[in-house]
Image: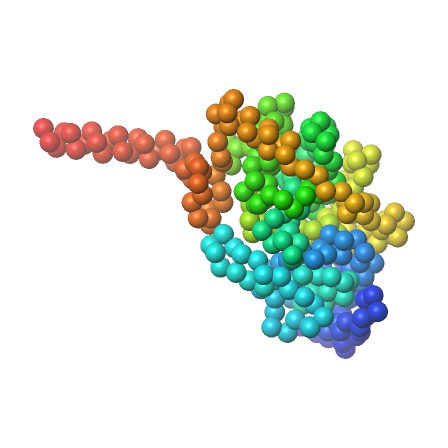
Amino acid sequence: MGKTGEAIELDAGGRAVRLSSPDKIYFPERGFTKADVARYYLAVGPGILRALRDRPTTLERFPDGVEGESFYQKRAPKNVPDWLPTARIAFPSGRTADEIRPTEEAAVLWAANLGTLTFHPWAVRGGRPDHPDELRIDLDPQPGTDFSDAVRVAHQLRALLGEHGLRGWPKTSGGRGVHVFVPIEARWDFTAVRRAAIAVGRELERRAPDEVTTAWWKEERGERIFVDFNQTARDRTMASAYSIRARPHAPVSAPLRWEEIDDVRPEDFDLATMPARFAELGDVHADMEQHAFSLEPLLDMAERDAHDRGLGDLPYPPDYPKMPGEPKRVAPSRAKHTKQERADEAAHEDEGAG
């Protein structure tokens, strides 16, 4: 494998963090090393800590770089230092785990030493693990659409939120999509927050049916932007602001200001360019911490969907237990096929009975 260098120590907020194998290549296409990753996270430290602070966080680890094997670390490693707290979270299955809960920049650096490229924080804080304090809207381009299409829908989302007294903060996903995060009061459970996300998606779909879809089944989405409501379900997480994504050019999930969103491209933001932007502008989402909006206007919209339009729940991800009021988790094409199979079987039985 070649030399990867002697271990070094880096200072993160006054705490020394050891970095082993600093010269190990993590992004071969651009030559970025493990030390480059660590120094990137030092450069954007206040920003990523704001995104992770006190949140149970899953680590997406690439110990041998983007071309090696990777895995998601949900449970805190046994060697987690005493200064890094954990939080207990419950999965849909009812099982629990203790995840790391960053409270200082050194936690990010410690995780980077383990090969963490992407941080996936829950939408909750450690003190209230069952009550999200962010509504996270994932605008996911489907085949035939791209980032510019997602941006157009993001503007419609901004207007919709504003009509209901809410405000969202946009960021790139690190890929082709757009994420919009809305800080909310930690009063509602995951089911209610998901209902609010579904209501938002359905209203966007009504306003722009050729551009937006809430169809869970890919065969029904077409060339539209999918509002991925299940990203608000328990145990579903999204890459944090400033997280590096595991693609050859080392892109990052970049917080944006609304006034610049039309003029940027996802590829503008990577491990090399973001530190300079951060040095110039700081964390453009820093003021999120000053807000906590009510979900009631969106839940009222969900209630109207149910009573006036007869719109119920939508399918959960396949690994979830069956949820109350949830429709069948069968793709429409499969459902039609199964229905025809039953009809053919019934006809065959009738023939046999004759």
Tell which residue pokes out farthest to the left in this image: 354
User: Which colour assignment does the render follow?
Assistant: rainbow
Kindly identify the residue that appears in the image at 82 percent across and 34 percent down.
Answer: 259
In the image, residue 154 sits, relative to residue 125, either above or below, namely above
Q: Position of residue 57 (x, y in %)?
A: 64, 58
Q: Position of residue 180 (x, y in %)?
A: 70, 40
Kindly identify the residue that appears in the image at 79 percent across and 45 percent down.
Answer: 290
Tell which residue pokes out farthest to the bottom in this image: 6
Q: Position of residue 48 (x, y in %)?
A: 76, 55
Q: Quadrant of residue 212?
A: top right
Q: Nearer the viewer, residue 198 or 298?
A: 298
Q: Position of residue 151 (x, y in %)?
A: 72, 33
In the image, residue 316 sits, relative to residue 243, either above or below, namely above
Kindly identify the residue that appears in the image at 11 percent across and 31 percent down.
Answer: 353
Q: For the N terminus, give its image quadrant.
A: bottom right
Q: For the C terminus, give its image quadrant.
A: top left
Q: Quadrant of residue 54?
A: bottom right
